[in-house]
Image (cartoon, rainbow, N blue to C red):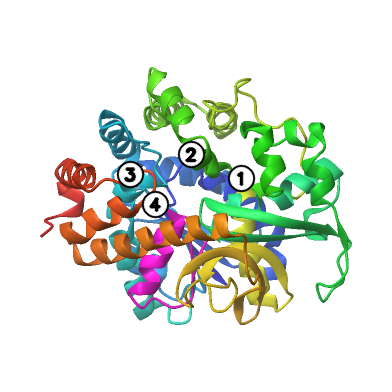
Amino acid sequence: MKLTFIGGGSVRTPRLIPSLIRRAARLDLQEVWLIDRDRDKLDLIGGMCKALAEHASFQIHLTTDAREALTGASHIITSIRPGLEAGRATDERIAFRHGVLGQETTGAGGFAMAMRSLPAILDYCRLADQLAPGAWVYNFTNPAGLVAQGLHDAGVKRVVGICDSANGAQNAASRFLGIPVAEVRHEVFGLNHLSWTRSVKIQVDEDGGGGEEVLPALLTDPQFIASTHMAMFDPDLVTSLKMFLNEYLHYFYHRDEVLVALLAKPETRGEEVLRLTTELLSRLRAATTTAEQISIWTEVMGNRSATYMAHARHDALRPKSTPVAGDDEGYAGVALGCVEAIATGVPQYTGLNVPNGNAIAGMEPDDVVEVSCRVDADGPHPLTIGSVPEGQYLLMREVKRYERLASEAILHRSKRLAYDALMAHPLVGSYPLAKILVNEYIEAHRETVGEWQ
């Protein structure tokens, strides 16, 4: 098998290597190709990846040539950031200047990111259709759900939106109960970064039946709540909804509180990530040995993770519980779990962003949703969710309308559709404000997004 990672120079790429080593024999993995446009960064990060995989059964190749990387690939993972961290910082500052949230995956900031991400990923997918027919594409590029919707709208087949937060409840229950994640089955529904988990079962039969329901008890256990991001939410909200909430729902359910907190910070999250990434790359270049580089990378990436959503976590600490060995691999585990299921035919269950089909009642068949899936040799199959509570359904429909309009706007570079899209988003909700934001984003990123009509 040949696996290609687009965005191989990302500082997150080394996280992929242990998961690849763990699965290499089952996948018959022979080649891993890391491609990035920044040769210096690729050599730096790729060199670390090669060292981590020194005794692996597969070879790692580094290239800036997309054709070389994609030719003959069976599986392709995409994780790129057009505009880099500085682009994200710009997106956030523009949004904050106009009094709206600027988080990079939702609302105004998410649209700005998608303006740059979707066309770039679409170009790679079209090239892959020529050079790697039949390959599966796993998109982790933000905003993952909107990008997956845009690719689907553009006719790209065999694309799966990947997000580790889709499996947050499954991983949290695994950590807290000390049960391997493969033995935990959760039922998640919604959209990317807008999803809810209404069931978590353990000791489920091979065919998915039976099992002990543990979520209600977990949601009333103060220790469990304190060990997860659920501690960010008002306890009365958790009691009312009776579901495990995707952490990004904090931007919706605590919108005004979050905005005040973020505006009070001396730097945005994008500026913080930019600072930490710049520090990391500088220290990696100055290191004299690979072992020193890996130590530096572990330290700085740990600091970056520890400050994630710190505006909502008043103790600024990540969950204290320890994952079960080999589990909770983040996005690498989600993507490679799919690769393994497709390659071996041994089914796996996970939350993914895929076309709805008939899974969630009231959503269109070609709406890309975040939903529990069974993955086998034929790819992912969304599990039947049926009807969902009205409050969640209405919010899903509102944000999905934004995503469909945003997808069309970006694919056609239409300002008019972009205005309609941002006005439709519940975190913007104003046509004049939508026009201001769209025009400022186009101007700020004109080099990347080109001319819009």
Residue denoted by label 3 = 428
Q: Residues within 10 Å of mark 2 (few under 14, many from 20)?
A: many
Q: Are marks 1 and 4 in contact (CB under 8 Å)?
A: no
Sooner in the amino-acid sequence: mark 3 or mark 4: 4
- Location of residue 276 in the rendering, given as x and y in whole percent from the top left corner: 44, 27
Span of residues in magenta: 137-161
Who is closer to the viewer here, 279 or 100? Answer: 100
Q: Are marks 2 and 4 in contact (CB under 8 Å)?
A: no
Task: Assess whether residue 141 is covered by the magenta stretch.
Answer: yes
Task: Assess whether residue 122 is covered by the magenta stretch.
Answer: no
Tell me which residue sits at (38%, 43%) in the image. 427
What whole-number distance in Å separates the C-alpha atoms at marks 2 and 4?
24 Å
Q: Which secondary structure, mark 1?
A: helix
Q: Are marks 3 and 4 in contact (CB under 8 Å)?
A: no
For badge 4, the amino acid type reads Ile
Would residue 55 be visible to someone looking at this image? no
Tell me which residue sits at (66%, 73%) in the image. 383
Who is closer to the viewer here, 347 or 23? Answer: 347
Residue denoted by label 2 = 251
Mark sitting on residue 52? 1
Sooner in the amino-acid sequence: mark 2 or mark 1: 1
- Location of residue 194 in the rendering, given as x and y in whole percent from the top left corner: 52, 52
- Location of residue 131 in the rendering, given as x and y in whole percent from the top left corner: 37, 77
Q: Which mark is nearer the camera, 3 or 4? A: 3
Q: Residues within 10 Å of mark 1 (few under 14, many from 20)?
A: some
What whole-number distance in Å separates the C-alpha atoms at marks 3 and 4?
26 Å
Q: Which mark is nearer the camera, 1 or 4? A: 4
Mark sitting on residue 84? none
For badge 1, the amino acid type reads Leu
User: In the rendered view of the protein, which quadrant contains the N terminus?
Assistant: bottom right
Q: Quadrant of residue 178?
A: top right
